[in-house]
Amino acid sequence: MNAKPIVAGMVVALIACGVVVRGVRAQGGAAASTPKKAEEQFKNIQTLKGIPADQVIPSMQFITASLGVECDFCHVQGAFDKDDKKPKQTARKMMEMMFAINKENFEGHREVTCYSCHRGNAKPVAIPVVMNEEPREAMGAPKKAEVETKESSGPDGEALLDKYLQAVGGAAAVDKVSSRVMKGTIDVGGKAIPIDIYSKDSDKRISFTHMPEGDSVTAFDGHEGWMGSAGHPMREMHGGDVEGAAIDADLHLAAHLKSMFSELKVHGTKKVGDSEAYLVVGEREGKTPIELYFDTQTGLLARMVRYGETALGRMPVQIDYADYRAVNEVKIPYRWTLARPSGRFTIQASDVQQNVPVDDAKFAKPAAPPEPAKGSAK
Ligand code: HEC
Ligand code: HEC
């Protein structure tokens, strides 16, 4: 391959981070054909040549989150390939700078990212900020880091996963769940909007948020994920989002967790809300790790943190689970809060039914309109 030095450096960085390109849940190996490269799918890729095409949009989301801007900070509306905006050109130079910093100082490990410097600002702050308020904590109060992590010689990872499976009702009960229909509300910007969520074995899930202007939909059909809202074309899910959607759609996740990981490490206990939880980090072959927080008292999953891989850095998604209630002998969270760098929302279920018939047609992907990202230039 015509690897320019910078690209070579990046590929090294990617390999160092354990990026192996694979289809989602390609356990059968069927989806393991060589994925498209960025430059094969997009028109004007110069710096990110060689990365999987599937990582272009996630990488863009990483930049957007790191700089605290929107796509149009760098892009002309509807023509993502154009180089008309100066910040886009600067961003290319910044990527090369970032790859060089990591190559020259960190043996190609991706230690420094856009976020290391930018911290949510288009222009990084170089001078330490003065304290503008009286310090909240009295002197001598324990520092955050001290209370947060307590190393313990507690249970090992496998035992915590077992305890979790027991806590939700045991493998047999979990296995019996073939579908789930939830009704509730989603908290969007302080407003409670009605939401319906349908899940069906295996790995199908769709949610309908009943916005005043029409339904907005997030779906995973067992293979592909997409999102749509009234008046906007459907958007495909990419990279880590698809993988995350597959996890969220798994009705038997509690029983499947163990087989997802090649290694489990317990990192002591941490606070999740008001409770203590064991942090278990699950390493996955060729994929980003997943952090699982199990309540030390109940054994239930209190938090999951996943990372979407991109060419420039990892994007976190944190889900906090609460209000566990038993439905058909299986405990499920009636409330969860999903948080990303770009925002957060909470869903509160009020009515949950399991093992009711759900038509497969519900999960059918609508006919593909041109994807806004690639259908850019006229
Ligand atoms: C800070 C600047 C910046 C921001 C913000 C940004 N991009 Fe980009 N984008 C770039 C650069 C630079 C490239 C070219 C990368 C290269 O040459 O390898 C690019 C390339 C692209 C491409 C490929 C276009 C083509 O056909 O060649 C798409 C699609 C894209 N961006 C979408 C987005 C989306 C969607 C967002 C918002 C989520 C976004 N970008 C935010 C800088 C940015
Ligand atoms: C080592 C620190 C560092 C890293 C890493 C870094 N930047 Fe920057 N970046 C800067 C500094 C400093 C400036 C501001 C220069 C100035 O004030 O004019 C800047 C400016 C920019 C600008 C111009 C902003 C504007 O207002 O016009 C863009 C766009 C940008 N960076 C994108 C990125 C992207 C994308 C990445 C990751 C691929 C990145 N930067 C990584 C330090 C960094």
Image (cartoon, rainbow, N blue to C red):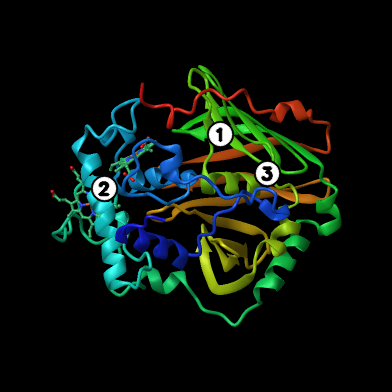
The type of residue carrying mark 1 is Ile
Element at label 1: strand
Q: Residue at x 50, y 64 (%)?
A: 18
The residue indicated by pointer 3 is: 249
Residue 309 % position (x, y) = 47, 54
Label 2 belongs to which residue?
92
Q: Residue at coordinates 21% horizontally, 45% vertically from top-left?
A: 90
Q: Position of residue 240 (x, y in %)?
A: 53, 49
Q: CA distance from mark 1 to mark 2?
A: 38 Å
**Separation of disc 1 and disc 3 at Cα?**
18 Å
Nearest to viewer (mark 1 / mark 3): 3
Residue under the point 16% across and 61% down: 128
Which part of the image, by quadrant, shows the C terminus? top left
Q: Earlier in the sequence, mark 1 or mark 2?
A: 2
In space, the residues marked 3 and 2 are separated at their CA atoms by 37 Å
Task: Say whether mark 2 is within 8 Å of ligand 1.
Answer: yes
- Secondary structure type for disc 2: helix
Residue 286: percent from the left, percent from the top?
57, 62
Quarter that holds the N terminus: bottom left
Instruction: Work out whether residue 238 can be spotted.
Output: yes
